[in-house]
Image (cartoon, rainbow, N blue to C red):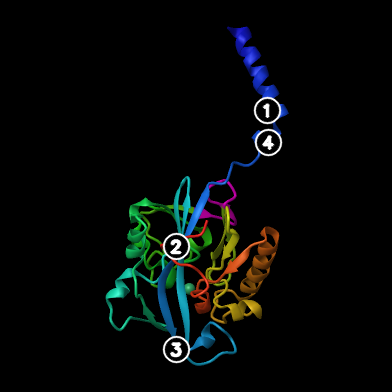
C-alpha cells in the first residue's frame, strides 16, 4: 500500500509538471450584468460637482448587478426606495432626490430576491449610494477599511455594524478569479473605490463611483472642490486612466445623465 501511494504521488507530481496550465488562475465565473435605475438628482448648483459651471443641474444615479457562479454582487444601492413614495422627492443638502422606480421592483422583475445578494460592494458611504443597504442585511459588505472606519459627524456608523463586512485595504479581487476587482481610488471620500469587471462578451468595464461625476469632468480632469482630499482626488483620476489602459476597459460614469440613453437597462442585460 505504501509503495502504491508513493507511485500515485509521483504520478500527481508528474501530471502537475507536464501540465502547467493547471496552475493558472481559475476560470472566470462572471456571467452577466444588469444596469439598474437608482434615482434622479436635481442639483441647485452644478458648480459643486463640476467646477466652472453654475446654476441648476442634473445627475443620474445608477446601480449595477452582477451574476457570478459564486453568487450575486450588487454595486451601489442608490438613493433609497422610500423616496419613491414622496411626491415632492427628498431634499438633500445639494438639491432634491427623486426615485421613479424602486430597486426592489427592478430586482423582482428579474426574479432576484434581496436575500439572493451575496456581496454588496459600495463605492463609498454617501447617502446617494447607500440608500438601500438595509434591504440586504444578509449580504457581505465589500468596502475599503478607510471608508468603514471614517467617523461620521453625526456619530452614527456609516454602515450597519451587524452586517458581515470585507474591509479591503487597497485593491481587492472579490471572487478570486480576476473577474470583479475593486480599485482603490481615495479622494472623494477617504475610502472611495471604483469597480473593474471583465464580462465574457462585453469586455472590461470600469465603474467610476464618485471619483468622477460627469463626462465633462473626466474629459477635463476636474474634481469637485468639496471632495475630502483634492490631491488624492487628482491622483485617483491618474490611477483610473492607468487601469483603463492596462485592462483595455471602458469607463462608465453612473452619475452622468447622458449615459442613461446609451445603456440598456434591466431586465435587459450584458454578457
Ligand atoms: Zn454620488
Q: Residue at x 70, y 33 (%)?
A: 20
Observer-side mark, 1 or 2, equals: 2
From the viewer's side, name the closer residue of 148 and 112. 112
Residue 147 drawn at (x, y percent): 50, 63
- The residue lying furthest to the right in this view is 18
Observer-side mark, 2 or 4, equals: 2
Residue receiving disc 3: 44
Residue receiving disc 4: 21
Q: CA distance from mark 3 to mark 1?
A: 63 Å
Residue 223 drawn at (x, y percent): 60, 78
Tag 4 secondary structure: helix
Q: Is residue 95 above or below residue 164?
A: below
**Is residue 138 shown left or right of residue 250?**
left
Residue 106 drawn at (x, y percent): 36, 64
Query: Sequence order check: which comes first, mark 2 or mark 4?
Result: 4
Query: Sequence order check: which comes first, mark 4 or mark 1?
Result: 1
Specify whether residue 255 is painted magenta.
no
**Is residue 140 shown left or right of residue 238?**
left
Residue receiving disc 1: 16
Amino acid at each position: 500500500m505504501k509503495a502504491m501511494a508513493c507511485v500515485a504521488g509521483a504520478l500527481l507530481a508528474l501530471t502537475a509538471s507536464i501540465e502547467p496550465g493547471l496552475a493558472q488562475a481559475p476560470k472566470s465565473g462572471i456571467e452577466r450584468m444588469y444596469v439598474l435605475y437608482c434615482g434622479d438628482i436635481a442639483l441647485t448648483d452644478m458648480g459643486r460637482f463640476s467646477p466652472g459651471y453654475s446654476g441648476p443641474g442634473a445627475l443620474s444615479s445608477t446601480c449595477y448587478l452582477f451574476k457570478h457562479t459564486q453568487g450575486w454582487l450588487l454595486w451601489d444601492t442608490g438613493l433609497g426606495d422610500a423616496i419613491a413614495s414622496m411626491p415632492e422627492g427628498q431634499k438633500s443638502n445639494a438639491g432634491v432626490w427623486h426615485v421613479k422606480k424602486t430597486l426592489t421592483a427592478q430586482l423582482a422583475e428579474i426574479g432576484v430576491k434581496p436575500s439572493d445578494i451575496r456581496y454588496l460592494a459600495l463605492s463609498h458611504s454617501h447617502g446617494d449610494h447607500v440608500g438601500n443597504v438595509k434591504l440586504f442585511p444578509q449580504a457581505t459588505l465589500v468596502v475599503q477599511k478607510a471608508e468603514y472606519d471614517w467617523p461620521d459627524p453625526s456619530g452614527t456608523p456609516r454602515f450597519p455594524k451587524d452586517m458581515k463586512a470585507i474591509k479591503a485595504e487597497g485593491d481587492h479581487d472579490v471572487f478570486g478569479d480576476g473577474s470583479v476587482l475593486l480599485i482603490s481610488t481615495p479622494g472623494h471620500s477617504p475610502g472611495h473605490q471604483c469597480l473593474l469587471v471583465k464580462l465574457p462578451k462585453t469586455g472590461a468595464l470600469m465603474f467610476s463611483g464618485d471619483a468622477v461625476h460627469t463626462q465633462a469632468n473626466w474629459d477635463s480632469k476636474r474634481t469637485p472642490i468639496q471632495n475630502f482630499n483634492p490631491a488624492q482626488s487628482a491622483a485617483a483620476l491618474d490611477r483610473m486612466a492607468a487601469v483603463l489602459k492596462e485592462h483595455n476597459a471602458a469607463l462608465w460614469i453612473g452619475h452622468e445623465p447622458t449615459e442613461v440613453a446609451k445603456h440598456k437597462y434591466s431586465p435587459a442585460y450584458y454578457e
